[in-house]
Amino acid sequence: MWHCLETLKKVSVSPKEQLDKYLSEGKKVIAVAPVYTPEEIIHAFGFVPMGVWGADIEINESKKYYPAFICSIMQTVLELGIKGKYSGVSAIVVPSLCDSLKTLGQNWKYAVKDIPFIPMTYPQNRKPDYAVDFTVEMYKRVINDLENITGEKFDESKLKKTYEIYNEHNRVMREFSKISEDYEVSAADRSAVFK
């Protein structure tokens, strides 16, 4: 078990190595900003949805785009993009769930021109029929943008298998969370598992 944990820690603290591994295997990687990015759509294409959570780095270039008080995750994600640390990624999908995420997408378009930005907008009111229709249209936009950027075609039938994979993953993560209450698993170790 500890060997698995060490592997997960290594990947979570050095995602560039994992990105390079995926790219060397010929896989297309789509960066996904936190949270609620439609990873299942990306996975159903056969792409790797890879989370971008920033880093513990000094912020220089992204200061040109953000005020000092903006979320450090957004600042460092943009900083890493500007410095080319996401080189090889086919696109980045950014949900607009908060003001910081909204500005990440807009700033990305100007600061990181070699990696296309795909917005994912969610309605504030999710239950009315018009909100459901809006969400469906936004998913279609993500699909269309991914098709245009990558040249691949979306096959909705593959989404069923993706849902099975993601549902099993979520079940295992819930089980891990419950089990880890009974053992001395540090917050850093839990974070490595969940990332």
Image (tube, rainbow, N blue to C red):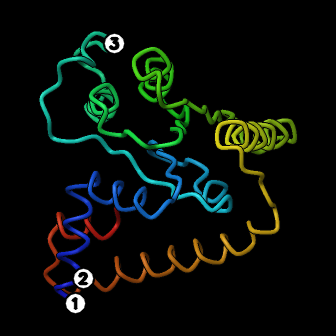
Residue 132 in the image, given as x and y percentages of width and height: 81, 43
Mark 1 touches mark 2? (CB < 8 Å): yes
Residue displayed at 27% across by 19% down:
62
Q: Quadrant of residue 164?
A: bottom right
Q: Which residue is mark 3?
A: 65
The residue tagged with tag 1: helix, strand or loop?
loop
Residue displayed at 34% across by 31% down:
81
Q: Quarter of the image containing the C terminus?
A: bottom left
What amino acid type should be assigned to the residue bearing mark 2?
Cys
Residue displayed at 42% across by 61% down:
22
Neighbours of disc 2 within 10 Å: few (<14), some (14-19), many (20+): few
Residue 39's disc is none
Neighbours of disc 3 within 10 Å: few (<14), some (14-19), many (20+): some
Q: Which residue is mark 1?
A: 1
The residue tagged with tag 2: helix, strand or loop?
helix
Q: Quarter of the image containing the N terminus?
A: bottom left
Q: Is residue 55 above or below residue 179?
A: above
Q: Which residue is mark 2?
A: 4
Residue 186 in the image, given as x and y percentages of width and height: 14, 71
Residue that protrudes farthest toward the top in the picture: 64
Label 3 vs 2, first from the N-terminus: 2
Residue 88 in the image, given as x and y percentages of width and height: 42, 43
Residue displayed at 46% across by 14% down:
110
Closer-to-camera residue (26/2): 26
CA gap between label 3 and label 2 equals 39 Å
Label 1 vs 3, first from the N-terminus: 1
Q: Is residue 116 above or below residue 189?
A: above
What amino acid type should be assigned to the residue bearing mark 1?
Met
